[in-house]
């Protein structure tokens, strides 16, 4: 019995150390192939890199941010999408840290464009967030739509949502433009139902949930945040929309993850 208790304590300590020091500093890329009859031969193979929730704070090292940038660049994406929460709302980033962060994130590479939306942490320092995005050549989509033309007269359409209630106002297309494929970006996963309901959205990309931080086999995510209490898994099919939730690359408050490795998503659009 004594040996069992000692072994159990050792196991708990090892799990804690792994969740505290190993998994939060590990990054993997998850690739998804999205087949659609809307994708033409010209768009076939189009690549989207998606990351979310860096949550930069006193524990974030330049080495870790460089690792993120390198992982994304290795995928050779056509566009890069960030679904919010760049800096932890409770952290006051210094001018030197901000310069270093901009210098590293400026190395992100894609063949076309970079887009971002506003997360709950970004709202506390929105001007600062906007300035950083501008410095690293990201376009902020604040309840706005964007058309991406790529080897085809009909574009991809990207909707960046701060408030899902405004989706109707940005769904209407400009005259003589017929999008091939529509992508909606929303920081909060629990807004998915309102976004996909009768809106002809092909793909929804979200973040915020951090994958539940700790995931227990056969039980699932343990920590549910406001705005991510219902949808925390990586993929859903809802109202004919494909929904993907990035589990984030940073952490709030306590730096801990378990069975929930920080992840960058890569989506490849292919002709069905």
Image (cartoon, grey):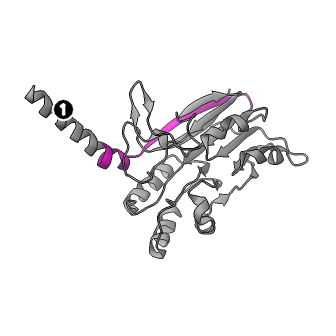
User: At 49% across and 68% down in the image, what residue appears?
Assistant: 103
Query: On the rendered image, what quadrant is the C terminus found in?
Result: top right
Horizontally, residue 88 falls left or right of residue 138, namely: left
Q: Position of residue 39 (x, y in %)?
A: 72, 34
How many labels were placed on the picture?
1
152 magenta-colored = no
Q: Secondary structure at mark 1?
A: helix
Specify whether residue 41 is in view: no
Question: Where 104 sits versus 263, above or below?
Answer: below
Q: Quadrant of residue 236?
A: top right
| Furthest residue in direction bottom, as rendered | 95
- Where does residue 159 sit, x and y in percent of width and height? 73, 47
Residue at 54 percent of width and 49 percent of height: 52
Which residue is more in the foreground, 163 or 72?
A: 163
The residue labelled by disc 1 is 8
Q: Position of residue 229 (x, y in %)?
A: 55, 37
Residue 24: image location, x then y, percent? 37, 48
Which stretch is magenta? 19-39
Vertical position of residue 145 compared to residue 37: above or below: below
Front position in the image: 110 or 55: 55
Q: Is residue 140 visible?
A: yes
Q: Residue furthest left?
A: 2
Q: In which quadrant will I find the N terminus?
A: top left
- Judge left or right: residue 11 versus residue 120: left
Q: As drawn, is 258 to the left or to the right of 197?
A: left
């Amino acid at each position: 019995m004594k040996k069992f208790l000692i072994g159990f304590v050792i196991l708990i300590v090892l799990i804690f150390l792994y969740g505290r020091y190993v998994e939060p500093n590990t990054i993997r890329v998850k690739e998804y192939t999205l087949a659609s009859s809307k994708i033409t031969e010209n768009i076939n193979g189009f690549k989207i890199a998606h990351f979310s929730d860096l949550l930069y704070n006193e524990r974030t090292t330049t080495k870790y941010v460089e690792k993120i940038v390198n992982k994304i660049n290795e995928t050779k994406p056509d566009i890069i999408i960030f679904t919010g929460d760049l800096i932890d709302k409770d952290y006051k980033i210094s001018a030197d840290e901000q310069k270093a962060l901009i210098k590293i994130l400026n190395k992100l590479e894609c063949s076309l464009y970079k887009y971002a939306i506003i997360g709950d942490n970004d709202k506390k320092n929105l001007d600062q967030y906007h300035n950083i995005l501008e410095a690293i050549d990201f376009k902020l989509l604040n309840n706005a739509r964007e058309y991406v033309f790529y080897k085809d007269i009909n574009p991809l359409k990207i909707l960046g949502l701060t408030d899902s209630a405004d989706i109707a106002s940005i769904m209407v297309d400009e005259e003589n433009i017929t999008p091939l494929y529509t992508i909606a970006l929303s920081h909060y996963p629990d807004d998915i139902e309102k976004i996909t309901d009768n809106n002809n959205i092909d793909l929804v990309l979200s973040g915020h949930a951090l994958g539940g931080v700790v995931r227990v086999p056969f039980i699932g995510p343990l920590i549910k945040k406001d705005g991510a209490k219902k949808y925390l898994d990586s993929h859903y099919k809802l109202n004919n929309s494909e929904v993907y939730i990035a589990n984030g690359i940073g952490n709030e408050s306590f730096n801990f993850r378990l069975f929930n490795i920080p992840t960058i998503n890569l989506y490849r659009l292919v002709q069905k």
